[in-house]
Image (tube, rainbow, N blue to C red):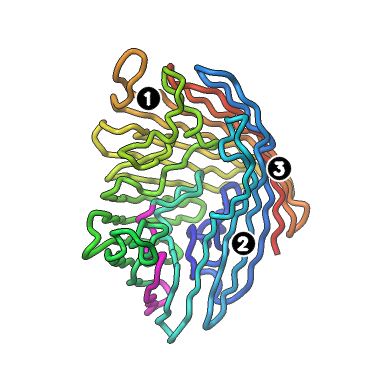
């Protein structure tokens, strides 16, 4: 079954201030049960004012995420599907609105014996790979596969997985396509040991014949009552460690060069990469969660050790403060900064580094009862670069039903 977030540890410090897991159940929580949630959300509008060019205000569209999961003694399965209604380019007044349902995650796991299961698309995250503020995992933290795998659990704490990736999460072999890569068998192995006090885990993806896409990672997490600390290292031959979308408003639309042309995701080395994220062959990550009686606190850190010859950021930092006003009402504010240390972009005054991107996101949450929760906030994001800068705002609102 899915093992997302280190859910039991997060619950132990009441980390309700942080984003929730994609799938509800973790191996250490429950062995059986059902879960369903539906979240309808919108940013209401997007306002964007670039350093060069005219400002834009557009309807932000709608998003609906449905999560359903069943965990039984023999069979476990889940689906997480997001449907969106928005413009193909929110900053182009002439672009049309589209309905998209491509963001779909799912898994099936069959327990063939007491300690041996067969999993399909059974992505499982080791706890130390999680960045709690951004609610993302470093990609090497998946010790399962997005293909088919054997899952062995000799004890309640230890899990070993061996299998083959398809063409999804880790860029595995294109088994069902016509490309040249359909003969590259993307073999993957991974392991995780988790107790109430700590966990260690890691994975190696793209072994044997697909080594040009080698991805590996090692991670650890320590849970000391009200404090959780995650730390990890990821190596990716392709430079994509799963941290490409760390901003709030998708700034690949925002950057314009001094001729007024969109850079459009920077197109780094012909890889349609998002500008506001962390890429690199070797990336260090860390996350922290602290829960007190009056507030909760979280922090993220990511750093790329790559040489300064790339067109993206090297450092990411974020914090999240949550104050429970009462049992139903809460106030939360988080922010991030992305910093580039290398001389890697061409501006009006020659080659230089990209100036920081900064975001702030305060919001109010209200739980009507155990089933219905509402949230409303304000996103402010600033690209401070002298050539590619911008100011952007949005008003996110959401309604979530959980059963």
Where residue 354 is drawn, which disc sits there?
1
Find numbered disc 3 in the image and state the secondary structure of the residue it sits on.
Answer: loop
Which sits in the foreground, 194 or 393? 393
Tag count in the figure? 3
- Could you tell whether 190 is left or right of 377 in the image? left
**SS state under label 2:** strand
Residue range corresponding to the magenta coloring: 139-157
Q: Residues within 10 Å of mark 3 (few under 14, many from 20)?
A: few
Q: Give the Cα distance between marks 3 and 1.
A: 39 Å
Q: Provide residue 54's location: percent of width, then percent of height.
A: 58, 19
* Residue 12 picture quarter: bottom right
Residue extending furthest toward the top: 349
Mark found first going from the N terminus, 3 or 1? 3
Identify residue for label 3: 325
Residue drawn at x 51%, y 37% as measured from the top left: 250
Depicted 381 relative to depicted 72: above or below = above
Is 146 a magenta residue?
A: yes
Residues at circles 2 and 3 in contact by the CB criterion of under 8 Å: no
Residue at point 65% right, 46% down? 85
- Residue ranking furthest to the right: 368
Q: Earlier in the sequence, mark 2 or mark 3?
A: 2
Q: Which residue is mark 2?
A: 67
Q: Can you say which quadrant of the picture contains the C terminus?
A: bottom right
Q: In x, y percent, where is residue 206? A: 28, 61
Residue sitting at x 28%, y 59%: 180
């Amino acid at each position: 079954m899915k093992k997302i977030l280190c859910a039991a540890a997060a619950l132990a410090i009441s980390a309700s201030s942080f984003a929730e897991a994609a799938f509800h159940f973790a191996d250490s929580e429950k062995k059986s049960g059902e879960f369903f949630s539906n979240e309808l959300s919108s940013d209401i509008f997007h306002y964007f004012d670039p350093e060069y060019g005219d400002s834009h205000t557009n309807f932000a569209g709608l998003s609906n995420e449905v999560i359903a999961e069943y965990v039984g003694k023999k069979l476990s399965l889940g689906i997480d599907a997001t449907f969106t209604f928005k413009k193909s380019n929110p900053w182009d007044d002439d672009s049309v609105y589209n309905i998209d349902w491509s963001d779909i995650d799912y898994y099936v796991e069959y327990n063939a014996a007491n300690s041996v299961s067969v999993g399909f698309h059974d992505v499982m995250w080791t706890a130390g790979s999680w960045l709690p503020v951004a609610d993302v995992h470093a990609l090497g933290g998946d010790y399962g596969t997005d293909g088919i795998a054997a899952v062995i659990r000799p004890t309640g704490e230890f899990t070993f997985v061996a299998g083959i990736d398809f063409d999804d999460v880790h860029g595995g072999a294109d088994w069902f396509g016509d490309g040249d890569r359909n003969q590259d068998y993307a073999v993957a192995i991974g392991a995780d040991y988790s107790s109430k006090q700590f966990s260690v885990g890691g994975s190696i993806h793209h072994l044997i014949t697909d080594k040009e896409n080698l991805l590996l990672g090692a991670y650890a997490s320590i849970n000391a009552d009200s404090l959780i600390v995650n730390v990890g290292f990821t190596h990716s031959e392709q430079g994509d460690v799963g941290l490409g979308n760390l901003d709030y408003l998708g700034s690949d639309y925002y950057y314009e060069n001094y001729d007024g042309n969109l850079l459009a995701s920077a197109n780094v080395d012909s890889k349609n990469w998002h500008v506001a994220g962390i890429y690199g062959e070797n990336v260090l990550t860390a996350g922290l969660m602290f829960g007190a009686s009056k507030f909760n606190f979280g922090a993220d850190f990511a750093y790329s050790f790559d040489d300064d010859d790339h067109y993206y950021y090297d450092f990411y930092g974020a914090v999240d403060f949550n104050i429970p006003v009462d049992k139903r009402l809460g106030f939360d504010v988080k922010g991030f900064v992305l910093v580039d240390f290398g001389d890697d972009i061409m501006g009006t005054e020659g080659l230089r580094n990209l100036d920081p991107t900064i975001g702030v996101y305060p919001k109010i949450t209200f739980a009507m009862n155990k089933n219905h929760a509402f949230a409303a906030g304000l996103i402010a994001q600033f690209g401070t670069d002298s050539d590619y800068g911008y100011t952007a705002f949005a008003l996110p609102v959401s309604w979530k039903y959980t059963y």
